[in-house]
Image (cartoon, rainbow, N blue to C red):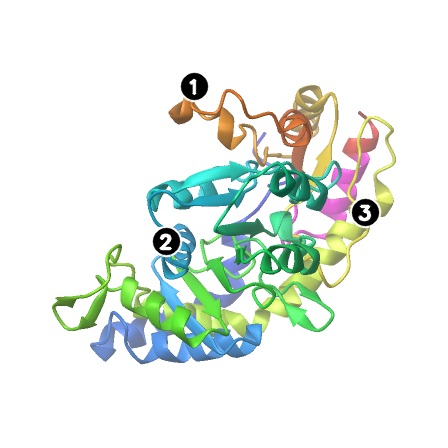
Amino acid sequence: MSNQIPVNSLSRHVEPLHAELSAIAESIIRSGYYVLGPNVKAFEQEFASYCGAAHCVSVANGTDALELSLRALGITTGDNVAVVANAAMYGTAAVLACGATPIFIDTNTNDGLMSVTALQAALQAGAAPKAIIVTHLYGLLADIEEITSLCHSRGIMVLEDCAQAHGATRNGKRAGLFGDIASFSFYPTKNLGALGDGGAIVSNNAQLAETATRLRQYGWSAKYTNSLRGGRNSRLDELQAAMLRHMLPLLDGWNTRRRAIANRYALGIRNPRITVSAEVGEDHVAHLYVVRSDERDALRVHLQAEGVQTEIHYPICDHHQPCHFGAFDNVHLPNTEADALSVLTLPCFPELTDTEADQVIAACNRF
């Protein structure tokens, strides 16, 4: 169906900015600065200020941000890192890239976020992670204060995965300020997305930021002097930095619109076969709007026929991925595994109209 309501529309998102972004691209082409130039430095300062952090280190993508954050924390071969298993392998891939072992922690039943109870049980059972990745999934802050307190009391370092939570705020603190270090993605579909790949690491710890800065450029301590293992070429380019600088002041407005759509769904979908998320506040930036249904596949077919595009975030748990065949057969995460069979993502992006949102609601209620 050609007139389907999309889950997301980057063309609709970028179109109002077309002239400004085109002018920015032209200025970068003429500037002669293409990598680690003045726009990169300025964006790092501006994004650090936006987050309320002392330091921001831009990198090539969000996955590198996760891995280099772990490496900055000293994670290496033989270490254990606690992580959830419901976010498409991003955190798990970063753990494995460091030569470390993931310790999978189950999620809550209603939001896909790391369960504090499950984490406590794992620690009491003898799990000894050196660090933990706390993913703020779908745009909602995890129980990050409680998790950070629990971990810091045991000497466990906390990495916040903020790839889906740019701007989420709780008690005056933005995503990325609760743990020791935080990673962000600027993939085009993110709440703050570039026109290509990009990522960032933020921290209030000057030593961690300095280590990350060196790791993103081969581990250099000076040009052509490789002093840190695990370094690579992971640099944000000038073009993406300049685009992000232009869009950063618009982020809070976009997040406000996302929340309005999410709350429209929360109040409007009234079908006992569909479990909706609760109304959202400042600690949720509605990166994705996810419902749950025991008849997920039938619901998806129904919505497709009604002209509503959907997605599944995410259909395969990390410990069930084919690349791990046999490695995690003893891992059982009942809530995580149940979510993989029931979650469904509805259209939610700033340019979605109220009329379109109401059509989604009506289609859900007719299921």
Q: Are marks 3 and 2 in contact (CB under 8 Å)?
A: no
Badge 3 marks a residue whose secondary structure is loop
**What is the CA distance from the residue labelled 2 to the residue labelled 1?**
27 Å
Looking at marks 3 and 2 on the same chain, the residue that comes earlier in the sequence is marked by 2
Front in this rendered view, residue 211 or 265: 211
Amino acid type, mark 2: Asp
Q: Amino acid at mark 1?
A: Gly
Is 23 displayed left or right of 332 in the figure? left
**Above/below status of 310 relative to 141:** above
Q: Which residue is mark 3?
A: 278
Check disc 1 and report its element: helix, strand or loop: loop
Residue 354 among magenta residues: yes
Q: Nearer the viewer, residue 223 or 137?
A: 223
Range of residues picked out in magenta: 346-362
Image coordinates of residue 239 in percent, x first then y, are: 33, 68
The x, y position of residue 342, in whole percent, is 68, 27
Of residues 266 and 128, which is closer to you in this image? 128
Which residue does the image show at 38% across and 26% down from the upper left? 323
Indicate which disc, 2 or 1, sits on the residue closer to the N terminus.
2
Position in image of residue 132 (x %, y %): 53, 50
Q: Is residue 186 left or right of residue 122?
A: left
Compute the Cα span from label 1 to label 3: 37 Å
Residue 326 - label:
1
Q: Quadrant of the N terminus?
A: top right
Name the side, left or right, on which 364 lies relative to 329: right
Upstream in sequence: badge 1 or badge 3: 3
Q: Amino acid at mark 3?
A: Ala
Mark 3 neighbour class, 10 Å CA radius: few under 14, some 14 to 19, many 20 or more: few
Question: Can you tell which mark lies on residue 288?
Answer: none
Label 3 to label 2: alpha-carbon separation: 33 Å
